[in-house]
Amino acid sequence: VLTGGAGSANGITSDDFHTGVLDPLLWQVVDPQGDGTVELVGAGTPDAQLLLSVPAGTVHDPWKNSNTALRVMQPAADQDFEIEVKFESEPTQKYQIQGLLVEQDASNYLRFDVYSAGGSPKVFSAAFTNGSPTIYANDTIASGPTIYLRLARSGDQWTARYSDDGLSWVTAASFSHALTVSSVGVFAGN
């Protein structure tokens, strides 16, 4: 589930993907490597999910000078917002990543995610300016089958939180970073 505040007042529309159709007027699939898979599973049920898959052997990573992660993005207004996503999968293999992206453009964006370094999962947050990252969080967290990520913006202030139950939240990072927001979404990588 990707939620973005109340309705679409802030330019971000919530979606629980239960319709079984990825609305092309709302979502844009970005697949820089051309080998990712985007599916909707569980249509018409409360357990509907957006499934992003990337193959091993090719880098799909939002990192220095090149965001090659598979992502599903929607346009967003350049104003204050809070977005939240629930992942029902756990990165367990080395370099598996899942998270949120907030983009100005291909070289200027924020990422907030959970990844595996081959052991316990880590929560990670970074801001990219002209492709160059500033890391704000890279901390080990408890493993579990479900992880919620929440990213809030107030002016140039960003707060990244995570939760294992959607009720009790831990602040992973709080930082100031200027960004002219154009889109938000989720990504998967390796």
Image: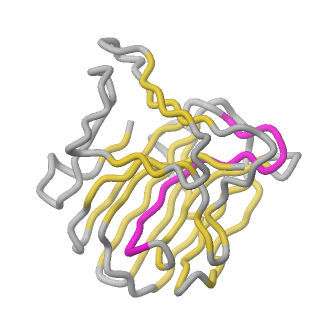
Count of all numbered marks drawn on residues in the image: 0
Q: Is residue 95 magenta?
A: yes
Instruction: Reply above or below: 96 against 1.
Output: below
Q: Is residue 79 magenta?
A: no
In the rendered image, residue 58, in percent from the top left (x then y), is placed at: 75, 49
The residue at the far left in this view is 9
Who is closer to the viewer here, 173 or 167? 173
Q: Using residue 84 as the reference point, say whether residue 121 is left or right of it.
A: right
In the rendered image, residue 168, in percent from the top left (x then y), is placed at: 50, 46
The magenta-colored residue range is 90-105
Q: Residue at x 72, y 49 (%)?
A: 190
Who is closer to the viewer here, 43 or 28? 28
Q: Residue at x 22, y 73 (%)?
A: 79
Instruction: Reply above or below: 154 against 72.
Output: below
Q: Residue at x 20, y 44 (%)?
A: 25
Q: Using residue 121 as the reference point, say whether residue 184 is left or right of it.
A: left
In the rendered image, residue 129, in percent from the top left (x then y), is placed at: 53, 86
Q: Quadrant of residue 41?
A: top left
Q: Using residue 24 as the reference point, say whether residue 65 is left or right of it.
A: right
The residue at the far right in this view is 118
**Colour pattern of the rendering:** secondary structure
Image quadrant containing the N terminus: top left
In the rendered image, residue 162, in percent from the top left (x then y), is placed at: 54, 52
Q: Quadrant of residue 78?
A: bottom left
Q: Residue at x 54, y 65 (%)?
A: 111
